[in-house]
Amino acid sequence: MLTLYGIPNCDTIRKTKKFLEKHTIPYHFVDVRKTPLPAEQLKEICDRLGLTKVVNSRGQTYRKLGIKEKQPGDDQLFNLLVEEQAMIKRPLLKNKNNYFIGYDEQGLLEFARLADPGVI
């Protein structure tokens, strides 16, 4: 089963949920504002996918915090991400020990097949 991380009021998360449900792909949703990812897990995700890919630099939280103007180093940016997990690009999905980020329907289907080869 996939784990979908995000915030419930995000349009991309809503769209992802509808897509997964349309394709009968089981998932478990985790609201990162209520249940933040542990720093160790977030570090693993950033190491695998790349910090710049994980941080949503076009999102409200990023702009609200003025991060572009501050130009933090990678360590500072990671620490901000741990504290402000609404900055995680969405959707973020986990399947066993693999991660997928960003809304791409074909990519989502292929990623879901890793979890369950029976997915169409």
Image (cartoon, helix red, strand yellow):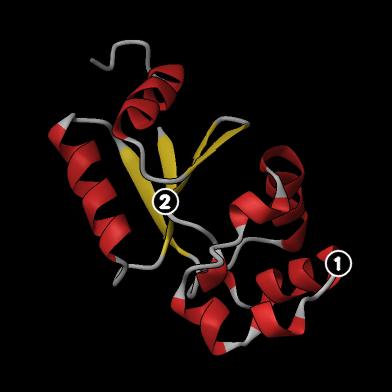
Rendered location of residue 83, percent (x, y): 67, 77
Rendering quarter of residue 49 = top right
Give residue 67's position: percent from left, percent from top: 67, 80
Percent of width and height locating residue 22: 13, 35
Could you tell me which residue is drawn at 71 percent across and 76 percent down? 80
The quarter in which the N terminus is drawn is top left
Q: Mark 1 highlights which residue?
A: 75
Looking at this view, name the residue that lies furthest to the left: 22
Numbered disc total: 2
Label 1 sits on what residue type?
Answer: Asp
* Mark 2 surroundings within 10 Å by alpha-carbon count, few (fewer than 14), some (14 through 19), many (20 or more): many
Q: Amino acid at mark 2?
A: Pro
Q: Quadrant of residue 74?
A: bottom right
106 sits to left or right of 99: left
* Lateral position of residue 103 relative to residue 36, left or right: left
Percent across and percent down for residue 64 are: 53, 88
| First along the sequence among labels 2 and 1 | 1
Residue identified by numbered label 2 = 91
Q: Are marks 2 and 1 in contact (CB under 8 Å)?
A: no
Mark 2: secondary structure: loop
- Cα–Cα span, label 2 and label 1: 23 Å
- 9, above or below 15, in the image: below
Q: Secondary structure at mark 1?
A: helix
Q: Nearer the viewer, residue 41 or 57?
A: 57
**Picture residue at 28% right of the left edge, 17% below the top:** 119
